[in-house]
């Protein structure tokens, strides 16, 4: 029996149009073409059919048509995203039989240095088809090539050629005996600065490593350099170029394995404001921090608001602050509680392993940054009710979680963070579109659900001796509010992450700081 790889989480904050290439994908073509398509500006026809399958009951039938004097069919899968493709090796494969000759390949999207996009087709060897199933494969080797994104393709050539395709797969090639990991952490610097030396470690000693410095500003092309690991496997990126304000990711890659460090470059005036807050915080002892949150803190690891917070705290208190980020996308307070209190014999829940030995260490501070999924409403109730947890159940769960944390980590200071003020207009537009296509719509940040949640959270903080930091008001009133959120109106841009980090620092540097 064929297996179909499900790419949906148990709960997804938003229905996204693409799947990350960090997950391997498989296509059995049992019910559809699996979003493989032939756009009208290319030649060929592609359709799902029952029968002519290698395994199971269905396959994809591909036929060539004429375009500018050539007979061919090109199929593409557009649904892949990845922030840092550089250094990866990706296998694109499928089984095919029929007539004509066929090959697998990829459409690589790069940059033209003017803010636009360049496209490059790359192909594997053409294989003559027959009545027997053959495996067709192409390996996109990006170990020395930069690409912003990749679209797997196949091409069938020959007049009146017909092919049947089944059991396609898109997988990473990652040697098990090779590892690459970052040693350096997230850094923030003022505009005009050169990137600092960034340290990585590889299991391969005395070997070459490819580096890619990838700026968020699309008008500046990535910089490809190499380095060599020493006898301990340590390799250092020596940056010499200046980059404009924004993020720069430095990727270290070897044989399909990769790791990255993110640097943020701020305009000098913005840097000075945050630096002033950070400089006022003097720690008398080490701090071990735990993060319990949702996708806002789970996403963009290595460069999100908590990574920035740790950088700033360590800048004037070197080496004193450590963090475990246990945020999980889609989380709300009752799910956090279920995961914290899970015992053997109970059914597994979403990403249970992420809490493995979570209290093996003792924490000085625990941040609870929830509320976005606790207050989301869906079209099933016409957005009149919260979809995941009622306000009463949320309050009771917060109290139990707070008590649980204190028992596991005596003396800990617990900080409750309000949710951000989501852009409900953008969220509603997405929800309306989902409903239009027959799915359930979700709207985040509706005031009628968020306002009672904020009151509850403040009350719980006051009655349990926790600290409370309001992020809702500053994100709602921010002058650059549209720049804080990505297109979904919920998740944070790099600017949004910087904004939240700055608000956290201001609170920790204030008269009522939990650090005092």
Image (tube, rainbow, N blue to C red):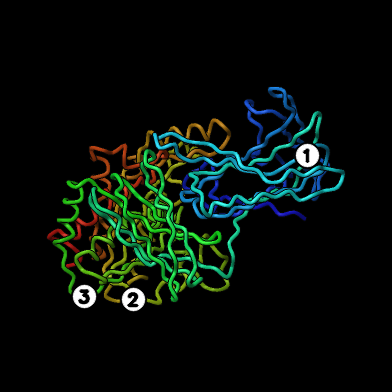
Say left or right for 246 vs 190: right
Circle count? 3
Residue 381 percent coordinates (x, y)? 48, 39
Q: Which residue occupies the foreground of this view, 316 or 17?
A: 316
Nearest to N terminus: mark 3 or mark 2: 3
Residue 198 shows up from this direction: yes
SS class of the residue under badge 2? loop
User: Which residue is located at x 55 percent, y 61 percent?
Assistant: 255
Q: Nearer the viewer, residue 79 or 205?
A: 205
Percent across and percent down for residue 450 are: 33, 45
* Lateral position of residue 126 relative to residue 175, left or right: right
> Residue beneath label 2, please?
362
Disc 3: which residue: 285
Q: Name the disc covering residue 101, or none.
A: 1
* The furthest residue to the right: 131
Rendering quarter of residue 289: bottom left
Reading the chain from its start, which is encountered first: label 1 or label 2? 1
For the residues carrying marks 1 and 2, which lies nearer the camera in this image? 1
Residue 231 disc label: none
Check the image and report above or below for 298 versus 318: above
Q: Position of residue 391 (x, y in %)?
A: 37, 51
- Find the distance from the CA under tag 3 to the CA under tag 2: 14 Å
Local packing at callout 3 (Cα closer than 10 Å; few below 14, some 14-19, many 20+) is: few
Quadrant of the rendering where the C terminus is positioned? bottom left
Few, some or many residues within 10 Å of mark 2 (<14, 14–19, 20+): some
Q: Quadrant of residue 396?
A: bottom left
């Amino acid at each position: 029996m064929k297996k179909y790889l499900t790419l949906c989480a148990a709960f997804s904050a938003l229905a996204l149009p693409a799947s990350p290439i960090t997950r391997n994908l498989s296509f059995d073509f049992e019910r559809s073409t699996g979003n493989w398509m032939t756009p009208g500006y290319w030649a060929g026809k592609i359709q799902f059919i029952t029968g002519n399958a290698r395994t199971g009951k269905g396959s994809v039938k591909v036929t060539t048509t004429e375009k500018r004097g050539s007979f061919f069919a090109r199929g593409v899968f557009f649904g892949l995203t990845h922030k840092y493709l550089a250094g990866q090796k990706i296998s694109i494969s499928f089984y095919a039989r029929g007539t004509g000759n066929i090959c697998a390949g990829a459409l690589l999207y790069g940059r033209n240095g003017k803010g636009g996009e360049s496209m490059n087709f790359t192909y594997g060897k053409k294989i003559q088809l027959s009545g027997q199933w053959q495996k067709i494969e192409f390996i996109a080797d990006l170990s020395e090539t930069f690409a912003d994104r990749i679209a797997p393709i196949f091409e069938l050539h020959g007049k009146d050629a017909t092919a049947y395709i089944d059991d396609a797969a898109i997988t990473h090639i990652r040697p098990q005996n090779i590892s690459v990991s970052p040693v350096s952490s997230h850094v923030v610097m003022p505009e005009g600065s050169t990137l600092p030396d960034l340290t990585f470690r590889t299991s391969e000693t005395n070997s070459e490593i490819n580096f890619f410095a990838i700026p968020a500003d699309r008008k500046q092309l990535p910089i490809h350099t190499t380095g060599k690991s020493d006898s301990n496997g340590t390799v250092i990126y020596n940056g010499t170029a200046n980059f404009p304000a924004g993020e720069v990711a430095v990727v270290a890659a070897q044989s399909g394995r990769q790791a990255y460090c993110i640097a943020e470059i701020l305009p000098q005036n913005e840097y000075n404001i945050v630096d002033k807050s950070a400089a006022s915080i003097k720690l008398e002892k080490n701090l071990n921090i735990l993060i319990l949150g949702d996708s806002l803190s789970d996403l963009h690891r290595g460069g999100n608001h908590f990574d920035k917070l740790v950088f700033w705290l360590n800048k004037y208190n070197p080496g004193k602050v450590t963090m475990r980020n246990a945020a999980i996308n889609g989380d709300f307070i009752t799910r956090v509680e279920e995961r914290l209190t899970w015992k053997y014999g109970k059914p597994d829940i979403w990403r249970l392993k992420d809490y493995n030995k979570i209290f093996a260490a003792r924490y000085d501070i625990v941040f609870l940054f929830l509320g976005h999924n606790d207050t989301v409403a869906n079209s099933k109730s016409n957005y009149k009710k919260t979809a995941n947890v009622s306000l009463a159940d949320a309050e009771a769960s917060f109290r139990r979680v707070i008590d649980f944390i204190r028992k596991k980590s005596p003396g800990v200071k617990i900080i409750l963070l309000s949710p951000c003020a989501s852009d409900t207009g953008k969220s509603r537009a997405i929800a309306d579109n989902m409903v239009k296509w027959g799915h359930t719509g979700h709207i985040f940040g509706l005031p009628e659900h968020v306002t009672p949640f904020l009151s509850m959270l403040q009350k719980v903080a006051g009655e349990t001796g926790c600290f409370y930091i309001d992020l809702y008001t500053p994100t709602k009133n921010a002058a650059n509010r549209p720049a804080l959120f990505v297109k979904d109106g919920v998740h944070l841009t790099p600017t949004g992450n910087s904004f939240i980090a700055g608000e956290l620092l201001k609170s920790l540097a204030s008269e009522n700081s939990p650090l005092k």
